[in-house]
Image (cartoon, rainbow, N blue to C red):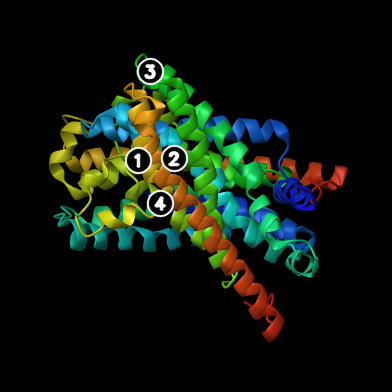
Amino acid sequence: MMGMWGNTIYSSGFAIEFEKWQGTLEEVIAAPSKLMHVITGRAISNAFFGLTNMIAILIIAVAGFRVSLGIADPLMFAVSLLLTLLSVSALGLIFASAFVLSRSAQALTNGLETPLYIVSGSMFPIALLPFWIHPAAYILGPTWGVDAIRLATSANYVSSSFWAGMSPGMAIFLDLTVMILITMAYVAIATVLFKLVERRARITGTMVQA
Amino acid sequence: MNGFRIFLSSAVFSFRAQFDWLNPVMWLTMKFVLSISQMAFFVFVGIFANAPIQFIAVGNALQSISWNTVFSVINITGHDKWDGTLPLVLATPANRLPLYIGRAMIHVLDGILSAAISFVFAAILFGVNFSQTNPLALIVAIVLTAFTMAGFGLLIGGFCFFFRNPMVFANIFTFGLLIFCGVNFPVSSLPAAIQPFSYIFPLTYGLTAARDAIIGQDLIQVAPTLAIQLVVGVASMLIGYMLFRSFENSARKTGKMEAV
């Protein structure tokens, strides 16, 4: 999860920053393809590339720390992982639209990485966080994805999941449904933001100087 | 006098060139966000794992210095390559020692500010108890850690002249500090074979001294630890300088200044 988000946010932030530094952002904007489509391709491919981080970490966990890994439901694990990747990518798109307008994309990238690790419950339960942070966790698609991945890994986790008392299969279904709805909202928001950002940048002519 | 002028101008212009894209508001915002988010992340992991959170909060407060003095200082080398300023740096007749060491010095001040902000967060948000703290010993430990870690940054930065992408090394070494230096767990928790490596990093000594100062030890008591830290930091700085000179000589002979 951490690898996926790290790769996505850096691909969104630094890709645009490097385009600015190297003077190629003008060509990207002038191309007939929409900027959002270009950035979407990068975000998805980088999120998938983040899987290599996950594999490396799992190998280290098993080989270095003798962690016993088992997957209770391999099919749902794969589905949950795939949908979480797409959700992370969609979230990255929202931030990418802001990065186009900011000279400080690099700083924003650094600043956004750890908060998602905290809020998504990827390393510790959300219940440990102050209650006022909980709403931020619930509107993050990856929060539900992490819950589904854990459920697919171990059926016993259901008692600690968002859907305690339900069957693991139903809990995964509900997690993925919520995540898909949130991801669709991300895509809708990102589409609107990219249109606004592109239009503003064309009117003011400050995209590259920003 | 001329050496001091070179030292100052190298410090100021290197920092300005590296962060010309960052406005002051964003700089300050990120300073707060990065300090609090890293500390919060590891503290909550510590709560989940029933680890002592004061230990973790103090460790991350001092480690925040590394983002400025290691990550940023290593990336000066990267910026020299990316921005095309390396030939200008090597062409100047200026004395190389103040030129090379000076470039890290604003980052030392920046790192001290990061640590100050982080220690305030540690006290307010995570209840770190500073009631027994010896302020002078803690301040000296923070300042010396910033200076010596800049030395370590210059060491790796010097090494990175020989590679195309210093950013990779900046990431590896900055995150590596979290494992080796006793930031989130004591060095003694590491496998015995790895523990000796911890003592090549000035941060390890800085953390020991800062923790001792927080429980009330005075400057005299922490001085031996700080003395070793200073030796390690200055040695790192000088090795970094020698690597820089070695790269310069090699670049002049082979004409591969920017080809690596």
Mark 3 belongs to which amino acid? Phe
Classify 10 Å Cα crowding around label 2: few (below 14), some (14-19), many (20 and above): many
In the image, which disc is placed on residue B183?
1
The residue sitting at 69% across, 54% down in the picture is: B98
A93 above or below B116?
Answer: below
Callouts 2 and 4 in the same chain? yes
Query: Visible in this render: residue A176?
Result: no
Q: Earlier in the sequence, mark 2 or mark 4?
A: 2
- Label 3 is found on which chain of the structure? B
Callouts 3 and 4 in the same chain? yes
B121 above or below B48?
Answer: above
In the image, which disc is placed on residue A93?
none
The answer for how far apart the CA atoms under marks 3 and 4 are is 25 Å
Mark 2 belongs to which amino acid? Gln
Q: Earlier in the sequence, mark 2 or mark 1?
A: 2
Mark 1 belongs to which amino acid? Val
Callouts 2 and 1 in the same chain? yes
Residue annotated with mark 3: B130
Residue annotated with mark 4: B201
The residue sitting at 68% across, 43% down in the picture is: A104
The residue sitting at 42% across, 48% down in the picture is: B202
Q: Earlier in the sequence, mark 2 or mark 3?
A: 2
Marks 2 & 1, CB-CB < 8 Å contact: yes
| Rendering coords of residue B245 (x, y %) | 63, 70
| Rendering coords of residue A75 (x, y %) | 24, 57
B10, B95: nearer the viewer: B95
Q: Secondary structure at mark 3?
A: loop
Q: Secondary structure at mark 1?
A: loop
- Label 4 is found on which chain of the structure? B
| Rendering coords of residue A153 (x, y %) | 20, 50
Say which of marks 1 and 4 sits in front: 4
Classify 10 Å Cα crowding around label 3: few (below 14), some (14-19), many (20 and above): some
